[in-house]
Image: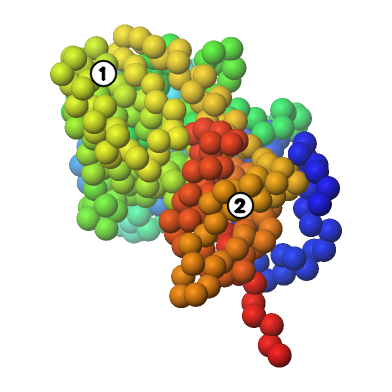
Amino acid sequence: MTEHDDQPALPDDPSTFEGFEGSEGFEQDGPVAPVPVLAIVGRPNVGKSTLVNRIIGRREAVVEDRPGVTRDRVSYDAEWNGRAFTVVDTGGWDPDARGLAERIREQAEIAVSLADAVLFVVDATVGITDADEAVVRVLRRAEKPVVLAANKVDDQRTEAETYGLWNLGLGEPHPVSAIHGRGSGDLLDAVLEVLPEPPPVQPTEVGGPRRIAIVGKPNVGKSSLLNKLAGENRVVVDDASGTTVDPVDELIDFGGRAWRFIDTAGIRKRVKEASGHEYYASLRTTTAIDRAEVAVLVIDGGQSISEQDLRIVQTVREAGRALVIAFNKWDLVDEERRYYLEREIERELVQVQWAPRINVTARTGWHIDRLVPALDRALEGWETRVGTGALNSFLGRLVAEHPHPVRGGKQPKVLFGTQPSTAPPTFILFTSGKLDASYERYIERRLREEYGFVGTPIVIQQRVREKRKR
């Protein structure tokens, strides 16, 4: 067997892999043209998120019949008549808001300042309110093109109620029913008229910024961590548990590089047990993990490691993503708690001993600079490849030192191994018989001792040699 330790050598005979499905690597983002941005604003509960779902053609924005469900500015990709644009959903805009609602309003104002055009949504069945007029004053100061959507116009009879919205001074009101889709095509035509044409595609760095999902149960400090990394308040933070319900992508320069962070809703309960907007938030958290390359699991260091934390760990492992564990609120962890936390880590996190762990305080920024080295180690492990020659030399030593136990008078042997893919590292073992799960775990443990694989799950697949018929 020839040694090619520096490259992924594979068997010369392609039939070796016949009938065996190897895992494929995850694709990186390709060059993307910057597209125009449309901010959707309006007072609370006029149907903005429902309209977003109608525009993007899928149920992604969280919808529930109570104000304040959308709290952050959240971006979605949209397309109409062959033109792509970005839709930014915002929290309800209440000019007299205080507390959390005031910060939601601030996020909406930021969205307008960053947008190329604005879609202002008004409830046609209610008519013009003082809050609507206050929003109009802010929009005039922003000097951005505005399209006025008269929502909840479900039939011809209701359409007459839209005429009074001319008094807002924003031009023609476009009647639409976000729920039923009535008038949405004409509304989107009007939107395209005010959006600028996107510039031609510029080649970008292959792969783009590394994609990081920030995950964890509610109220452990995920949004605080993202805000501290960004150096500004990009995500609404509040002591109320579960403040974030939509994933928020942010490009952040940190540690001298650009990273794409995906802030996610806290996973509270199993999806099948969740209800209302929590159900969709839970689904999108899983989607965010799938979109990421590495997940940062934020755990409150002052609280016991819970079943919810372990469920998130399992979700990350099953998705095949790299993992970093950040114990937050470390300023509140005393000596006694540290002792018990170490015992919990040994007991509860035994399946992910390979994940880098850091202790941080997101509120003050203490030790968040340790996140980048931990991410680098995890991504390096996630993309580690072992040459076929080196792998089989390693497997030969391993089997000689610790052969598989005899089962029923037979002793399965590892005949050959190869690593067809990385991200996560995936190994195919060609064997003379089915290996015990315990022996498979032994091989994984020895692989980590030999090659590191810090911060990444390892996938091991077996291909058992068929018995030849006489």
How far from the left and from the top, in percent, is residue 360? 34, 17
How far from the left and from the top, in percent, is residue 373? 52, 19
Indicate which disc, 1 or 2, sits on the residue closer to the N terminus.
Answer: 1
Residue under pointer 1: 329
402 left or right of 237? right
Front-most of residues 129 and 104: 104
Q: Give residue 126's quadrant in the image.
A: top left
- Disc number lying in front (1 or 2): 2
Residue under pointer 2: 400
Residue sitting at x 51%, y 47%: 444
**The disc labelled 2 sits on which kind of residue?**
Ala
Front-most of residues 339 and 275: 339
297 left or right of 400? left
How far from the left and from the top, in percent, is residue 282? 33, 46
Label 2: how many Cα within 10 Å (few below 14, some 14–19, many 20+): few
Label 1: how many Cα within 10 Å (few below 14, some 14–19, many 20+): many
| Residue 380 is at least partly visible in this image | yes
Residue sitting at x 48%, y 62%: 405
Label of residue 58 in the image: none
**The disc labelled 1 sits on which kind of residue?**
Lys
Discs 1, 2 touching: Cβ within 8 Å: no
Q: Is residue 397 above or below residue 237?
A: below
Residue sitting at x 49%, y 43%: 445
How far from the left and from the top, in percent, is residue 199? 71, 29
- Give me the C-alpha separation between circle 1 and circle 2: 48 Å
Which residue is situated farthest in the left direction here?
Answer: 336
102 left or right of 319? left
